[in-house]
Image: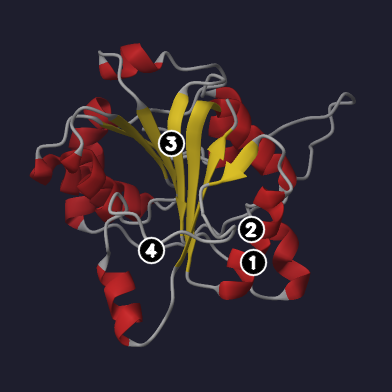
Amino acid sequence: MRNNVISLELDDQGRPLRRIRSFVRRQRRLTKGQQHALDTLWPAMGTDYQAHPLDLDALFSRAAPVTLEIGFGMGVSLVTMASAHPEQNFIGIEVYLPGVGACLASAQEAGVSNLRVICHNAVEVLEKMIQDASLALVQLFFPDPWHKERHNKRRIIQASFVELVSRKLAAGGVFHMATDWQPYAEHMLAVMSAANSFHNLSFTGDCVPRPASRPLTKFEQRGQKLGHRIWDLMFEKET
């Protein structure tokens, strides 16, 4: 695999463009199992970054609704969903290489064949690799909330990103977000509510109960025992 997570963009004068990153590239040594998974499973389940659109039907050797998850961590919930819904196709994007290796290993153990993984900046993947109106569902679970006010501009949920997601979703497609940080939930709700191309699936105009489609992770179970609340937001693209 090519681990070129960030590619260089130039302006009209050939000068590098400065992009504000919405993520931090955490560094941790790969375990032997994660490295083995990357070495042996990437050719079948991994997809290298490319600056032109993917043929999703060819990628999966079939036509089926596609769910794309941004920042899947160690891939636990993503593999669970792919295993539970073999009739659907799943794409996971993650810049954390140990997480990519762990996800590939888990997918093999679960016998999952409807999952493809990309190790690259999600914004560039959406812009360059994903065709417009090609996705049924986009998932963003527990992104970095960038707690400090001076860092809020780094949050991935901004008007420009929401517009990008809207273009990639088919009519009637859903953008599902989840966070355990209330100020970020409020920020997400404000940004999404201002997007004319989406409408909130919550009957109360804010959050929805955790849908059964989002697996309950050990992290979330531990948080619940400590009294932590999780906010799920689901917005549907207008038809």
**Lower sequence index among marks 1 and 3:** 3
Q: How far across and how far down the image is residue 237, in percent?
A: 57, 34
Seen in the picture, residue 41 relative to 221 is either above or below; the reply is: above
| Labels 1 and 4 touching (C-beta < 8 A) | no
**What secondary structure is found at the residue carrying circle 4?**
loop
| Labels 4 and 3 touching (C-beta < 8 A) | no
Given the image, on which type of amino acid does mark 4 rest?
Arg
Q: Residue furthest bottom?
A: 226
**Lower sequence index among marks 4 and 3:** 4
Given the image, on which type of amino acid does mark 2 rest?
Leu
**Lower sequence index among marks 2 and 3:** 3
Residue position marked by numbered label 3 in the rendering:
137
Instruction: Looking at the picture, tell me which residue is in the foreground, 134 or 44.
Output: 134
Given the image, on which type of amino acid does mark 1 rest?
Glu
- Distance, label 1 to label 2, CA atoms, is 5 Å
**What secondary structure is found at the residue carrying circle 1?**
helix
**What secondary structure is found at the residue carrying circle 2?**
helix
Label 4 CA crowd tier, 10 Å (few <14, some 14–19, many 20+): few
**Which label sits on residue 28?**
4
| Labels 4 and 2 touching (C-beta < 8 A) | no
**Which label sits on residue 186?**
1
| Labels 1 and 3 touching (C-beta < 8 A) | no
Residue position marked by numbered label 2 in the rendering:
189
Q: Residue at x 84, y 29 (%)?
A: 11
Tell me if residue 7 can be seen. no
- Distance, label 1 to label 4, CA atoms, is 32 Å
